[in-house]
């Protein structure tokens, strides 16, 4: 099953000490040879986008948006998940009319006011080796029920309209509605 464009929602039974507890992850790459990659959407860091731009010798006019922690893998990788109205030099399809970009040119474009309608910037990735995510979702050994992920088709509002625990709660609510709709 290809999960590109799906959201993984941390199961409410996941212990709070698990680094993925209450996470909402957007899957942007999934294949049987290389595994699955995504970014956590709802874990803001203490770094502003403006500070990150400054580190890359660019400016961003607002100090409000925060950079999010996309995951524990490759903590130097900068990933921009965004709407398909915009591209940079290293942009790839990510499902649901969304794209991911990761290059230095995106800082230049955005510093000049050329940016996507909706976007979220993350540092780091969430990755699974081939077959690992299936095992976690199904609770197969060595994983158990507390590692299970809930999977949904997202809305643009859930992806870009919420943050933190509110985003996780909204995603759980959407999951419930999708499950009920499957029965009727």
Image (tube, helix red, strand yellow):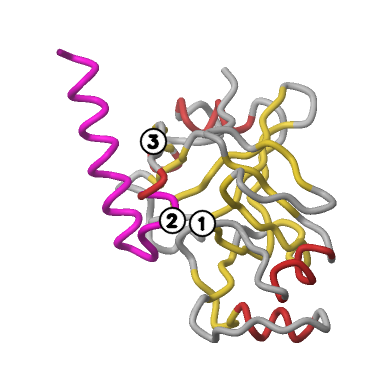
Crowd around label 2: few <14 · some 14–19 · many ≥20 (10 Å): some
Camera-side mark, 1 or 2: 1
Count the labels in the image. Answer: 3
Camera-side mark, 1 or 3: 1
Crowd around label 1: few <14 · some 14–19 · many ≥20 (10 Å): some
Query: Which image quarter is the N terminus in?
Result: top right
Which percent across, then down, holds residue 167? Answer: 34, 57
**Image position of 142 with respect to 179: above or below:** below
- Helix, strand, or loop for circle 2? helix
Q: Which residue is located at x 59 percent, y 52 percent? A: 82
Q: Residue placed farthest to the left in the image?
A: 184
The answer to whether marks 1 and 2 mark residues whose Cβ atoms lie closer than 8 Å is yes
Residue wearing tag 1: 118
- Magenta region, residue range: 158-184
The answer to which of 46 and 141 lies nearer the viewer is 46
Which percent across, then down, holds residue 64? Answer: 49, 82
**For residue 42, what is the image quadrant?**
bottom left
**Image position of 104 with respect to 181: above or below:** below
Residue wearing tag 2: 160
CA–CA distance in space, label 2 to label 3: 19 Å
- Helix, strand, or loop for circle 3? strand
Position of 111 compared to 156: left or right? Answer: right
CA–CA distance in space, label 1 to label 3: 25 Å
The answer to which of 122 and 107 lies nearer the viewer is 107
- Helix, strand, or loop for circle 1? loop
Residue wearing tag 3: 150
Q: Which residue is located at x 48 percent, y 66 percent? A: 43
């Amino acid at each position: 099953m290809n999960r590109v464009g799906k959201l993984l929602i941390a199961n409410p039974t996941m212990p709070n000490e698990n680094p993925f507890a209450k996470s909402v992850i957007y899957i942007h790459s999934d294949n049987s040879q290389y595994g699955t990659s995504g970014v956590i959407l709802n874990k803001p860091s203490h770094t502003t986008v403006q500070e990150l731009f400054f580190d890359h010798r660019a400016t961003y006019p607002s100090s409000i948006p925060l950079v999010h922690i996309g995951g524990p893998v490759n903590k130097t990788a900068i990933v921009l998940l965004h709407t398909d109205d915009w591209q940079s030099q290293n942009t790839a399809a990510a499902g649901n009319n969304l794209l991911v970009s990761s290059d230095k040119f995106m800082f230049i474009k955005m510093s000049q006011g050329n940016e996507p309608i909706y976007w979220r910037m993350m540092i780091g990735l969430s990755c699974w080796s081939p077959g690992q995510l299936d095992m976690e979702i199904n609770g197969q050994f060595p994983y158990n029920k507390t590692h299970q992920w809930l999977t949904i088709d997202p809305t643009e509002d859930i992806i870009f309209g919420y943050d933190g625990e509110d985003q996780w709660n909204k995603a759980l609510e959407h999951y419930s509605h999708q499950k009920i709709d499957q029965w009727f």
